[in-house]
């Protein structure tokens, strides 16, 4: 990952930050949250929360919220199949995570459709090869897979993620699939980074609570989410949405810490204002970026690791200037303000689309941002005072300097597909743009990159998990005979 070597970007004064925090505590204690789980409500009631079981409403005292904030670790590790890819989440370190999208896009027509299992495999291999993509997200890179029953999608994509990447993996939950994922993680000697979604305003759904108990009790760090659409699910003002997000964050943290004191977590969040002219949320908005700065500032004050998403899914329908502008600016702001994990490579169009070609272009942006975070290295050697005095004024130069030969690669950032050649060279090499170069690189990666393979024992564990899950969901009536036939054909074809 990248280490931020400068003071983080901040937009709130200490007084404003304290006002937001106090307002969130007041909201939790007076209005409370809806928690759709009898088990969770009983646990909260046993720990001095006021619980209305009929309305599923829990009001959390301020002292308990602040105590649970203090219990939460400031750092934790996500272990990967490849031990060199283990990640320590927290502090001043930033990791970029593979982006999210529902569907595959045809780059020639810009029409979308569900991805095939083979296309998902290719996307996973490309993400594994990208040097600035530190965490894989095979589960959410494509959430619509052709001919795979919805109830098996997460587990099939997790299997692909583990078969074709050695990197740490993000995950989720659905219809109890987390039970199979936890067993597989145990068999492989890894853990996962599962997100747990909430509903705004002020609601945690029962399936997310069930997943929280499963993961936390198994010792797997979790990533509660507290996103909202400003003007619809939270106040239209950035300050009001920050109060809402802080309250929901503390609600999640109280629940996690009551399940298991000291349990590790990070908070994923996002703020998209609603365009009242169309009813559509606006990804890539400046309000999204402002919300990220404020939320990062609040989370850092409590030493809570964060997962940011500003700009990760531009509103652009193509991989064009708007896409680069919205993704790049939002990601830069999230990084400068202290994010620890940033969702980024490959997703766009408001999470509708994912494509490995875009992930290759995004990886250049991630590297540029990472080099910016590392800042200016000021040492006796880099100050170059003796060299400056030795070279003197013109006709002196630094081209033949040993210092230049030694440090130019360290100082500079070298993109893989951004075109940095001269105009005449561009003409001579066929006038290829960044999209062309990214497509070429994808072909090279698929032809040459070999992810760390599973051992025979690990492969048996993955296949055993899939077979058990298929049998379970079919016996529950969640996979029809028609779905099963298409599913088996898809597996055979892949």
Image: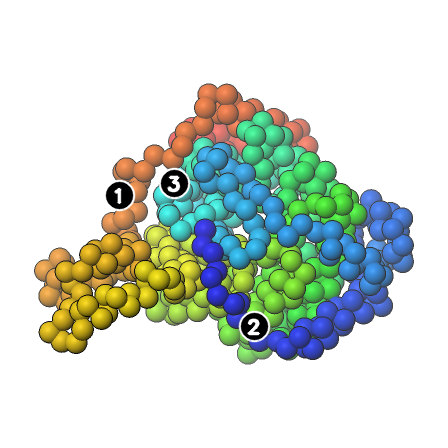
Side of 88 relative to 362 (left or right):
right
Whole-percent x and y of residue 226?
A: 65, 60
Whether residue 31 is visible to the viewer of this picture, yes or no, is yes
Mark 3, residues whose alpha carbon is within 10 Å: few (<14), some, or many (≥20)?
Answer: many
Question: Mark 2 vs mark 3: which is more N-terminal?
Answer: 2
Q: Is disc 1 in contact with disc 3, using a CB cutoff of under 8 Å?
A: no
Q: Secondary structure at mark 2?
A: loop
Q: Is residue 137 above or below residue 112?
A: above
Pointer 3: what residue? 125
Q: Secondary structure at mark 3?
A: helix
Question: Mark 1 vs mark 3: which is more N-terminal?
Answer: 3
How far apart marks 1 and 3 lie (CA) works out to: 11 Å
Q: Quarter of the image containing the C terminus?
A: top left
Q: Is disc 2 in contact with disc 3, using a CB cutoff of under 8 Å?
A: no
What residue is at 35 percent from the left and 62 percent from the top? 380
What residue is at 46 percent from the left and 40 percent from the top? 85
Q: Is residue 114 above or below residue 308?
A: above
Side of 147 relative to 208 (left or right):
left
The way the protein has been coloured in the rendering is: rainbow
Question: Mark 1 vs mark 2: which is more N-terminal?
Answer: 2
What residue is at 71 percent from the left and 73 percent from the top? 18
Q: Is residue 360 above or below residue 11?
A: above
Side of 362 relative to 248 (left or right):
left
How far apart marks 1 and 2 lie (CA) works out to: 41 Å
Foreground pick, 286 / 52: 286
Mark 2 vs mark 3, foreground winner is 2
Pointer 2: what residue? 10
Whole-percent x and y of residue 244?
A: 70, 68
Whole-percent x and y of residue 145?
A: 48, 43
Q: Secondary structure at mark 1?
A: helix
């Amino acid at each position: 990952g990248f280490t931020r070597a400068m003071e983080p970007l901040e937009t709130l004064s200490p007084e404003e930050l304290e006002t937001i925090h106090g307002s969130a505590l007041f909201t939790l204690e007076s209005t409370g949250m809806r928690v759709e789980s009898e088990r969770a409500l009983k646990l909260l009631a046993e720990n001095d929360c006021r619980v209305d079981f009929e309305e599923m409403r829990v009001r959390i005292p301020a002292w308990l919220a602040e105590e649970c904030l203090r219990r939460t670790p400031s750092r934790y590790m996500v272990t990967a199949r490849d031990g060199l890819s283990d990640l320590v989440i927290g502090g001043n370190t930033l990791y970029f995570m593979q982006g999210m999208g529902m569907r595959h896009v045809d780059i020639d027509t810009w029409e979308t459709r569900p991805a095939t299992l083979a296309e998902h495999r290719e996307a996973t291999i490309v993400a594994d090869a990208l040097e600035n993509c530190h965490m894989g997200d095979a589960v959410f890179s494509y959430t619509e897979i052709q001919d795979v029953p919805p109830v098996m999608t997460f587990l099939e994509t997790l299997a692909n993620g583990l078969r074709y990447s050695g990197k740490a993996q993000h995950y989720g939950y659905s219809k109890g699939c987390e039970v199979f994922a936890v067993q597989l993680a145990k068999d492989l000697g890894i853990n996962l980074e599962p997100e747990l979604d909430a509903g705004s305003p002020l609601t945690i759904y029962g399936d997310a609570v069930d997943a929280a108990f499963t993961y936390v009790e198994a010792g797997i760090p979790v990533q509660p989410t507290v996103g909202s659409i400003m003007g619809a699910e939270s106040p239209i003002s950035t300050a009001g949405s920050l109060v809402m997000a802080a309250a929901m964050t503390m609600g999640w943290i109280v629940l996690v810490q009551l399940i298991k004191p000291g349990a590790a977590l990070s908070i994923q969040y996002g703020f998209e204002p609603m365009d009242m002219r169309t009813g559509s949320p606006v990804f890539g908005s400046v309000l999204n970026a402002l919300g990220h700065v404020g939320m990062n500032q609040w989370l850092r004050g409590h030493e809570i690791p964060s997962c940011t998403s500003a700009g990760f899914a531009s509103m652009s329908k193509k991989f064009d200037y708007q896409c680069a502008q919205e993704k790049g600016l939002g990601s830069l702001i999230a990084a400068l303000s202290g994010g620890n994990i940033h969702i980024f490579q490959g997703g766009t169009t408001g999470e509708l689309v994912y494509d490995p070609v875009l992930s290759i272009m995004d990886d250049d942006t991630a590297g540029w941002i990472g080099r910016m975070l590392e800042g200016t290295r000021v040492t006796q050697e880099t100050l170059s005072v003796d060299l400056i005095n030795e070279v003197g004024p013109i006709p002196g130069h630094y081209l033949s300097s040993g210092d230049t030969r030694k440090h130019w690669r360290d100082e500079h950032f070298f993109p893989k597909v951004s075109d940095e050649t001269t105009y005449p060279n561009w003409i001579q090499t066929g006038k290829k743009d960044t999209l062309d170069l990214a497509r070429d690189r994808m072909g090279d990666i698929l032809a040459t990159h070999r992810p760390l393979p599973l051992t025979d024992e690990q492969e048996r564990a993955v296949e055993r998990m899939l077979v058990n899950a298929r049998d379970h969901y079919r016996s529950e009536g969640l996979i029809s005979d028609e779905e099963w036939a298409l599913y088996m054909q898809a597996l055979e074809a892949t």
